[in-house]
Image (tube, rainbow, N blue to C red):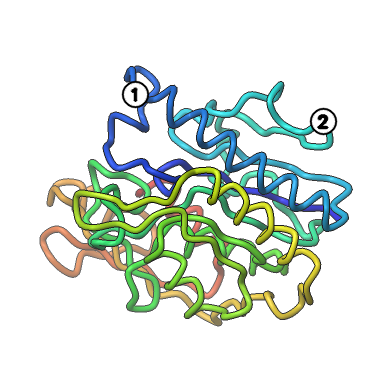
Amino acid sequence: MKVFISVDIEGINGICCWDETEADSPRYQEFKAELQREVNAACRGALKAGATEIIIKDAHDSARNLSILDLPVEAKLLRGWQGTPCSMMAGLDETYDAVMFVGYHSPSRSSGNSLSHTMNVSRLHHVKINGEIASEFTINSLYAAYNKVPVVFLSGDENLTELAKKVNENITTVASKTGLYGATISKHPSITWKEIETGSEKALKGDLSKCQLQLPKSFDIEIQYKRHLDAYNASFFPGCKMIDSDTISYHSNNYYDVLVMFKFLL
């Protein structure tokens, strides 16, 4: 069984402030270590379920947060940014049996995480896909669907896990914390590690076909920027048009084309 794990940090246990996510901050090392432990828990569960190959995409900020020495020997780590439109899912293709997400967070304009955002914090108010504000989980799970790979597991803030269940109730989820506007409530990390390990094993031992997401036939995208100048600049991308002083729209029937647009405009 070949498993792909995409890893972010704002959804891990306890984290609640931006400086805890930034490599040059003294607080970062504490939460980098917690991220490593949660990823390791997901790997242990996957191995118990029979995974023979695990590829981990480090997908937060510099994409250099995890240590290969601290991962199970069966895992391979993809660090840095390859530069493809796949972004946080770089390396995924149709040869994988399952996709898992660790440390993911609620979308922009949500109170479900004190660090809620979608992609670029400094530039974007929101990204909508077919009328719904999209999270990074949304964007990346649709790429899994594009490759016909089931999304079987998600850990992150409680609000995001509830949103994921609305997409497909068969996805196994673990709430690592609960967001309360600018604060978080978390269980002891050791409980979260066990839940992630157990959840990952359960997810991969289940009927993976039930976790196959359906890709929409078409995509209506709306991007609202924090600066109207960014919206105006983005409106010159082929297929884009301004629909308000700070907002553009884009339509495509091909999700990969959407990802190419995101690469340049988010």
Comparing 39 with 122, the one in front is 39
Residue placed under numbered mark 2 in the picture: 73
All told, the count of numbered labels is: 2
Residue 231 is situated, as x and y percent measured from the top left of the image, at 21, 53
| Residue occupying image coordinates x 77% and y 64% | 204
Report the disc number at residue 146: none
Bin the neighbour count of mark 1 within 10 Å (Cα to Cα): few under 14, some 14-19, many 20 and up.
some
Residue 253 as seen in the image, left or right of residue 106: right
254 is higher (above) or lower (below) than 131: above
Comparing 22 with 222, the one in front is 22
Q: Secondary structure at mark 2?
A: loop
Residue 157 as seen in the image, left or right of residue 2: left
- The N terminus lies in quadrant: bottom right
Residue 12 as seen in the image, left or right of residue 194: left
Evaluate if marks 2 and 1 touch, with contact meaning CB atoms under 8 Å apart: no
Residue placed under numbered mark 1 in the picture: 27
Q: Quadrant of residue 242?
A: bottom left
Q: Secondary structure at mark 1?
A: loop
66 is higher (above) or lower (below) than 263: above
Residues at marks 2 and 1, CA–CA distance in whole angstroms: 28 Å
Amino acid type, label 2: Val
Q: Quadrant of residue 72?
A: top right
Residue 257 is situated, as x and y percent measured from the top left of the image, at 52, 61
| Residue occupying image coordinates x 30% and y 67% | 222
Residue 154 is situated, as x and y percent measured from the top left of the image, at 56, 60
Amino acid type, label 1: Arg
| Residue occupying image coordinates x 47% and y 60% | 175
Q: Earlier in the sequence, mark 2 or mark 1?
A: 1
245 is higher (above) or lower (below) than 79: below
